[in-house]
Amino acid sequence: MTDPSPTLLLRRVRATAADAAGVTLDLDALPGVQLGVMPGWLTGEPLAAQGVETEMPNLPTIDLPPADVTPWVLRVTAPQPDCLRLVLAPAGHPDLVDDGTGRGIVVDPAPAPVALGAEEAEAHVAVTAGHLSLEVGRAPFTLLLRDTRTGAVVLRTSDRLRQVAGLLTAPSALTDGEGTTLNLELGPDEDILGFGEQFGRLVKNGQLLRLRSEDACGTGTGLAYKPVPVWHSSRGYTGFVNTGAVVTADVGHSRPSVLSLGVAGDAVDLYVMTGPDPAARLSAYTALTGRPDVPAPWAFGYWMGRCRYHSSAEMLEVARTMREHEVPADVLHLDPDWLVVDRLNTDFIWNTERFGDRKQFVTDLADEGFRLSVWELPYLDPASPVFEHAEREGYLVRRTDGSLAGIQKTPTPDGRMRALLDFTNPDARRWWQEQHRAFLDDGVAVFKTDFGEALPDDVALFDGTPANEAHNLYPLRYNGAVSDAIREFTGRTPLVWGRSGWAGSHRYPGQWGGDAESTVAGMQATVRGGLSYAMSAPGFWSHDIGGFFGPELTPALYVRWTQLGALSPLMRAHGLRPREPWAFGADALGICRDWVRLRYSLLPYLWQVAVESATNGWPVMRPLGFHFPLDRVARTVDDSFLLGSDLLVVPVFDDADAPVERTFYVPEGEWFDLQDDTCFVGPGFHTVTVPLDRVPVLVRAGAVLPRVDVDPSVRSTDDLLDRPWRLHAYGSAAAERRSFVGFDAQPCTVDGEVVRHG
């Protein structure tokens, strides 16, 4: 037997107490050891109590570890119906008395609290709240959650899983010097989705994910810009670990029937939302963590950017050329060249040599019908004139040894360190926000809040945030500071364009999928990342049309990516090299213009989806399983998606000009092609031949889409705000729907003829 380790296994319930707010169970944690080469765990309890098969012929000699008890606590509360909060921590841990809002992820600790009861039985303690019953095993300590309406087990720990000698392979909960782990048993047909913006397969079974916000350097590196410790189980629950610490999610990777959640801290603060479908459970999750406001209508237009535009003259020429080619567009984005010191630095010193007077530049763009988006990041270069002031005032992050912290894992072009703003210091946060005021006064519409993933792990933040939680909370605080500044200084709905994120980041729209490679693989990974993020951070997400970097982008792939972008929640083209549609030839320009106009014609529908999503805490871009959770095929599909509930978008992943065969899955019901009314019946797979100027976009039977006519005179969404809407009804059962939400966010009635399809 190996020497005893500092690992503790939670093994027994010692006492139970209930109060007005919840139920507290005192637990015994015992030292645990493993038997050398034989997998499995042992404690100092009698072998029979541990289920050891003592008759095994090759059972090695067993020396039990000491049975010293370390007190732990399980605190159970019910912040809203069909939701339990389980805090598992050492006795006296601050999480046991925190209402959940301490990290800034949860913003409403108890949207609709439910009273709990505790009933003691010989083998377990039953904690009940509404329709939920949590059975806490006494010895051994286990968790089993039931929905009392059906009797179904929704979630259980994995204590009954053993190896051949009867040793535990996945104890319910254990803690060691690395952190605390909760092990859950995966059902035979249970699928796990979520964990933020992951670029692999949508169903996470078999994957090992380390949830740490990283400068991922692309979508194919295995890293994630916006990991989120939120996941969905097809058994009917959604889990959320309320932490800033790194979470390791082993989804049947190491042990095929175990979802292992390792938190790099000494406690697990777990919320479990149950419900019939992901939609209901995301509504519950966002009731706790907040919901985004609906961006202004112009945000749903076409955005154009490039890394880099080098002058105001260059950008104005792009704006005029867009108008000459009669391509509708609303936003031009300006990357770092607006700065004087512009290599991984933002000090808000406008480069007048390149871009002249800022207010005049914004006005000149407005004359062409464009709004301005401006890049930033939360790092300061020592070469900046404001660096000394920021350091002297204590605005910059320090390490635990008192030295100035520099960014990690993001290389600098000159070898100098880059300091980071400490957003937990109220004075520093306010100083950073104030730097935006003049830009907003001059008419800047949106800030691209780039980077934010480079905070070191050994930091001492102003507010005392534990070092192990500071890194992942940094993007949330950064984007929140900028979003709040826009709201305060302009009085309008704020909008940022963020790359990094964590749980709660969905409150600050929008986000984009980072630096995708300009390849078919990059496009495919982008869609998967957006669908995965939708299940954990519902709201307004998008991507760089054409990808950000890589091999020379073929005109055909640019067209295919533009088609995807035209049916995405937000639409922005951006990359290291030109992304303007005329840069890819006359044919690509013509096709892309048609798809941009199609998007603009769908603006009224996009607006309905946006309002619905923000109201309910849902994503705009939705996996098929979001609305068809009982369809085992639909919930695995990650090469197509729903835009709202009525449009099924089937991107074509190809970089050639020739027509392509595309096989795709259609859920239950009739679905009509948006462009030619071809009917597809589901559930089932269909194969079509798709020329370059088409992708399958299907409308659900029964849907009524509000649309607006778009002609060559339309320059931007502003030209559509007062145009009449035309209703398109699909299928024989289409409702006579007339009531919608107008662009002023007020109910409106659409009169006139209804165009019927199918």
Image: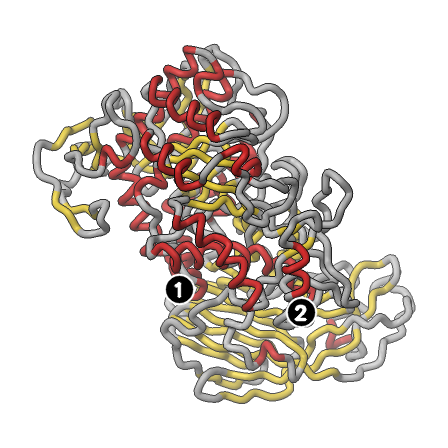
Counting labels gives 2
Pinpoint residue 125: horizontal percent, then vertical percent. Answer: 54, 81
Q: Residue at x 19, y 32 (%)?
A: 728
Pinpoint residue 275: horizontal percent, then vertical percent. Answer: 40, 60
Which numbered marker is on residue 287? 1
- 145 vs 216, nearest the viewer: 216
Q: Residue at x 74, y 64 (%)?
A: 399
- 411 vs 347, nearest the viewer: 347
- 383 vs 668, nearest the viewer: 383
Q: Quadrant of the N terminus?
A: bottom right
- The answer to whether 565 appears left or right of 103 in the picture is left
Q: Amino acid at mark 2?
A: Pro
Q: CA distance from mark 1 to mark 2?
A: 26 Å
Any part of residue 585 in sight: yes
- 608 vs 66, nearest the viewer: 608
Pinpoint residue 57: horizontal percent, then vertical percent. Answer: 87, 62
Q: Which residue is mark 2?
A: 466
Q: Residue at x 47, y 46 (%)?
A: 447
